[in-house]
Amino acid sequence: MLSGNRRPQAAADGSVQPMTSLIPAALVAAWALIVYGVLTLLRPMQLSPELSLYVVQPMVWLSLAALGFVGWHIGLHGRPVATPALIFSGMLLGSFQVAAWLLAGLAFGFGFSLFAHSPLGLLGNLIYAGSVLLALELSRTVLVTGSFRNPVLAVLATSLLLTWLRVPPARWAAASGTGALGPFLGEILLPYLAEDVLASTLALAGGPLPSLAYRAMLQGYQWLFPILPQLPWTVTAFVGTMAPALSLYGFQAARATPRASGRRDLSSAWAAVGTAVVALIWFNVGLFGVRPTLISGDSMHPTLRAGDVAVIQEVSPTEIHVGDVVRFQYESVHVVHRVIEVRQTQEGLIFVTQGDANNQIDPPVPANRIDGRVVFVIRKVGWIGIKVKQALQGAS
């Protein structure tokens, strides 16, 4: 159960928690970074897939699990106690999320899992997934109970670190590609972060067993089921974010007491953030009829400047007139320029465009390449997105 501020002296059982609790947390965090680096170096090595996935990588993960186990049992004092009710809660919350995925699958369809499901394949899946599960949950408990004195900060910091640890470097680099950031956020980053926030809350309340019970349900479903839902990434973003958010809210509400009215701050905040982020993703892919476009160049200066966000509305080509600013596809990029001429041909409407700051006219654009018309401009808010994209491209 989270409180607004965890005192450094008061542990879960009322005993004194010394500052040496920071040492195992720091050691676990440092070793987690080393594990991430080792796994990154292993991927380009010429190892057979079976040797890498079922032997070498599990050994690396188990080294982190061992350090987490030692840190939990020796380095920390006043550890939270895992009651049967907390362990059952973890299993129940995991089952609820599996049920949410299955319901989504009934609506959108199922497909065969990409993981091997022969007897040896299932054994290998158990070895790999089990080693990762033990490493993450044992290290999670040390981090969340031995790092920040404020439990909300401890949960958030632990969740961010472990979410980053779970995402391979190649996926971060791939997110900088055209049109890849939305699916990366929706299919991977947001569901991982939501899952980690709930698991970290369970670990703070009862140690590694409740979070192990929760994530074991999810990992067993992912690695052992031969048939899994085949969902659009926007649906994956919604289910993967909102199911943990609702589970977190329910868990906190069930454990709340009259003296702990402020202990649901994290769950309420995560539910609000999750809803807002999913709405932004849906907005970004045009499910509401409009979508934002980040302006990264100066071809439309001074009407549009680098860092502005132009809101594009889908309209019929017949509603586009000379003077309108439109977004269209040119080769593999999106361009936002002004229409200077509309031509009616036997093949249909053709639009001639030009940037306000350009001295050359663009090649003619057929109607089927027009995405929509600019209806609103938000100034300067896109500079964060430009810097993030530049950082991702520099890391790839």
Image: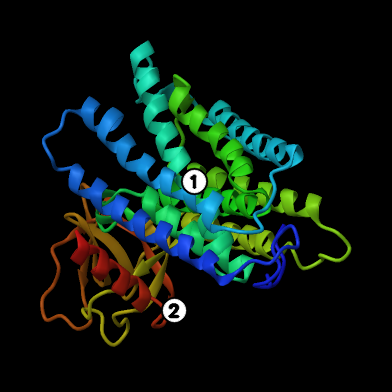
Q: Which mark is residue 212?
A: none
| Residue type at the position of mark 1 | Phe
- Residue 85 quadrant: top right
Q: Pick the quarter of the image with the N terminus.
A: bottom right
User: Under tag 1, what secondary structure?
Assistant: helix
Residue farthest along the bottom direction in this orientation? 302
Which is nearer the eye, 364 or 149? 149
**What residue is pinned by disc 1?**
69
**What residue is pinned by disc 2?**
378
Q: Between marks 2 and 1, how big is the CA–CA gap?
A: 50 Å
| Residue type at the position of mark 2 | Ile
Which is nearer the eye, 30 or 330? 30
Using residue 184 as the reference point, say whether residue 45 is left or right of it: left
Q: In the rendering, at what x and y percent does residue 391 appear? A: 26, 69
Q: In the rendering, at what x and y percent does residue 9 appear? A: 68, 71
- From what the image shows, is residue 274 above or below residue 202? below
At x 36% / y 61%, what residue is drawn? Answer: 30
User: Under tag 2, what secondary structure?
Assistant: strand
Residue 234 visible somewhere in the drawing: no
Which is nearer the eye, 119 or 149? 149
Residue density around tag 2, few if under 14, some if 14–19, many if 20 or more, within 10 Å: some
Using residue 249 as the reference point, say whether residue 383 is left or right of it: left
At x 59% / y 32%, what residue is drawn? Answer: 98
Q: Pick the quarter of the image with the C terminus.
A: bottom left
Q: In the rendering, at what x and y percent does residue 236 appear? A: 49, 42
At x 28% / y 30%, what residue is drawn? Answer: 55
- From what the image shows, is residue 134 above or below residue 251? above
Using residue 317 as the reference point, say whether residue 146 is left or right of it: right
Which is nearer the eye, 217 or 110? 217
Say how many tags the image has.
Answer: 2
Q: Nearer the viewer, mark 2 or mark 1?
A: 1
Q: In the rendering, at what x and y percent does residue 227 appear? A: 46, 21
